[in-house]
Image (spheres, rainbow, N blue to C red):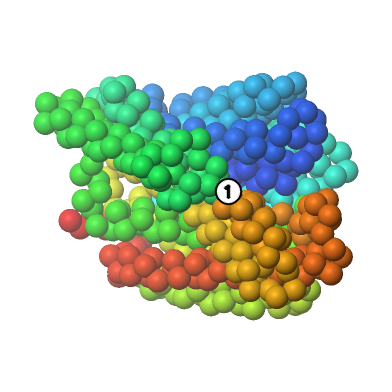
């Protein structure tokens, strides 16, 4: 790889790291944000969720704008918008200003940068260098996810979460300066026009689906918990998700209609008929669903159950980051000798094993050695997967479809991340409530009146809290000390059962992903070879 390409790869890797850092940082800073803005945890969680909604909803539009205005120009515009959002977030004085800066502006910026970045890799790197570039970017995404808690925990504890966003402005400025090493990928034919109707339908459809899934932990998947509306005795969740699917169906019909009339669609649905491309996109969704589901579960165990602070939590998640990054680099080299199908499937097997290793570490006290090994194994498996998928997706399409392909793969990534957090979160909460309810109901040391009270409270939902809060609540209603101890002991056991259940589901999700990987290319890709098949 030439010196110029090494410099460019460093710029793109920094951009990839920047785009995925925020959510991990904000998740460990919630308590401080609540205090700084005199608001509630629910409000801050809504701001964080809105960021994912904006990104998922606008990713396809961002990819098309890259085709219209040029990938390099769109990348630079997105970077400026992202930096402006970071600056506003750093100086936010209220929740609305925080939401505007972080959720809206940074979300829009990321939706412009990420699809263009994928196309820029394809347009600036060839052959083995392209495979290496995609492996590095995949590794940097994992590093950003894992480093975020450490950086956020350290800054929030010793300084202020605002400094992270000040730093992002500086990094964005450096990346902008580095764009001088990029060359604009050539585009054949005339520039397309933007499909505004398709943009609105896709954005609304994806946003509504993601919103519905994110709210499932609060509203309940089917049985109402804290649902604002009950329809025929069901929670609002399935109806919101169905509405999103209807909008996506209307979007698909509109896109086909535009193509039939010879007009430019937002995305050529024919891309999804390319088997390697479709399989690669599905695998990106599955990989992020599993990874983010585990990354949601593990911090709850470390912080809520064991009482570690944000910095200690981040340090214990470092083996995943290191394993993912270095294995992604090694996976890029292995791609010159082995087919993506074999490497991805090997990665899925390793992730499956790592999930069971993690289940074995979920105990009242942490065995650091076993836990760090399990997290490292997880990183190795994920690194093998992410090192292949970017090259698979981009090698399956023509140069003119790079931005659209980037929009679709990043949409799949964001949907996978959101679904992973929501699905594993809902399973975790549901498992906790069921296990705790059964524990209390079957405990002969708990009075019938207390059992009835607990059953009534659990029927309206709950959340994953520290056992100290359960003890305080039990003591506040005047229960005897022996009964309080029995209830708290049952709750602590239920926490561990629920965490193990969530990790078990994460492990089982690798099985359909393994089956889906059957359509990945079973020959070595040179980084630019077309892998198209319909």
In the rendered image, which quarter is residue 16 located in?
top right
Residue beneath the point at 64% across and 78% down = 360
- Residue 155 seen in the current view: yes
Of residue 83 and residue 457, the one placed in the foreground of this image is: 457
State the quadrant of the C terminus. Answer: bottom left
Q: Determine which quarter of the picture holds residue 258.
A: top left
Residue located at (23% from left, 41% from top)? 269
Q: Is residue 348 left or right of residue 13?
A: left
Q: Position of residue 70 (x, y in %)?
A: 39, 28
Q: Position of residue 436 (x, y in %)?
A: 64, 65
SS for dot 1: loop
Question: Left or right: 26 with respect to 2?
Answer: right
Reading the image, the residue beneath label 1 is 460
Seen at 28% across and 58% down, the residue is 276
Q: Please name whichever residue, 515 or 213, is drawn nearer the observer in this view of the structure.
A: 213
The residue nearer to you, when weighing 494 against 525, is 494
Q: Quadrant of residue 369?
A: bottom right
Residue depicted at x 28% and y 65%: 519
Residue 290: image x %, image y %? 50, 61
Q: Nearer the viewer, residue 446 or 49?
A: 446
Count neighbours of disc 1 (C-alpha within 10 A) and say few if under 14, some if 14 to 19, many if 20 or more: some
């Amino acid at each position: 790889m030439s010196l110029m390409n090494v410099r460019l790869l460093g710029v793109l890797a920094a951009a990839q790291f920047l785009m995925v850092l925020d959510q991990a940082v904000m998740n460990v800073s919630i308590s401080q944000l609540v205090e700084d803005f005199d608001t509630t945890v629910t409000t801050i969680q809504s701001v964080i969720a809105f960021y994912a909604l904006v990104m998922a909803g606008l990713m396809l539009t961002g990819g098309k704008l890259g085709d219209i205005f040029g990938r390099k120009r769109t990348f630079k515009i997105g970077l400026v918008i992202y930096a402006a959002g970071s600056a506003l977030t750093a100086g936010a004085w209220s929740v609305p200003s925080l939401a505007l800066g972080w959720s809206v502006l940074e979300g829009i910026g990321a939706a412009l940068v990420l699809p263009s970045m994928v196309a820029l890799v394809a347009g600036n790197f060839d052959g083995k260098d392209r495979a290496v570039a995609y492996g590095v970017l995949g590794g940097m995404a994992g590093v950003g996810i894992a480093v975020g808690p450490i950086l956020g925990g350290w800054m929030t504890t010793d300084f202020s979460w605002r400094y992270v966003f000040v730093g992002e402005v500086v990094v964005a400025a450096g990346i902008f300066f580095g764009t001088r090493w990029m060359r604009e990928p050539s585009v054949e034919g005339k520039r397309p026009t933007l499909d505004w109707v398709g943009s609105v339908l896709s954005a609304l459809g994806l946003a509504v689906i993601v919103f519905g899934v994110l709210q499932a932990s609060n509203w309940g998947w089917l049985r109402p918990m804290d649902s604002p509306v009950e329809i025929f005795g069901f929670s609002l969740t399935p109806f919101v998700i169905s509405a999103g699917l209807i909008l996506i169906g209307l979007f698909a019909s509109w896109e086909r209609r535009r193509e039939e009339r010879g007009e430019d669609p937002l995305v050529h649905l024919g891309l999804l008929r390319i088997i390697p491309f479709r399989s690669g996109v599905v695998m990106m969704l599955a990989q992020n669903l599993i990874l983010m589901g585990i990354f949601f579960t593990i911090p709850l165990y470390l912080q809520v159950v064991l009482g570690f602070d944000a910095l200690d939590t981040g340090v214990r998640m470092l083996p995943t980051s290191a394993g993912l990054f270095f294995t992604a680099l090694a996976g890029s080299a292995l791609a010159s000798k082995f087919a993506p199908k074999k490497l991805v499937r090997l990665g899925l097997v390793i992730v499956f094993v790592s999930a069971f290793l993690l289940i074995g570490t979920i105990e009242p006290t942490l065995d650091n050695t076993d836990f760090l090994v399990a997290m490292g194994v997880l990183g190795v498996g994920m690194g093998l997967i992410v090192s292949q998928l970017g090259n698979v997706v981009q090698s399956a399409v023509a140069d003119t479809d790079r931005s659209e392909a980037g929009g679709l793969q990043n949409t799949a990534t964001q949907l996978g991340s959101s679904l992973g957090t929501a699905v594993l979160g809902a399973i975790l909460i549901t498992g906790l409530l069921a296990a705790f309810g059964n524990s209390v109901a079957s405990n002969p040391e708990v009075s019938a009146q207390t059992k009835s009270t607990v059953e009534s409270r659990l029927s309206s939902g709950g959340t994953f809290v520290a056992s100290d809060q359960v003890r305080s609540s039990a003591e506040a209603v005047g229960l005897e000390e022996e009964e309080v101890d029995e209830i708290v002991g049952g709750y602590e056991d239920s926490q561990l059962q629920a965490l193990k259940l969530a990790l078990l589901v994460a492990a089982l999700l690798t099985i359909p992903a393994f089956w889906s990987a059957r359509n990945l290319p079973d020959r070595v890709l040179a980084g630019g070879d077309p892998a198209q098949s319909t």
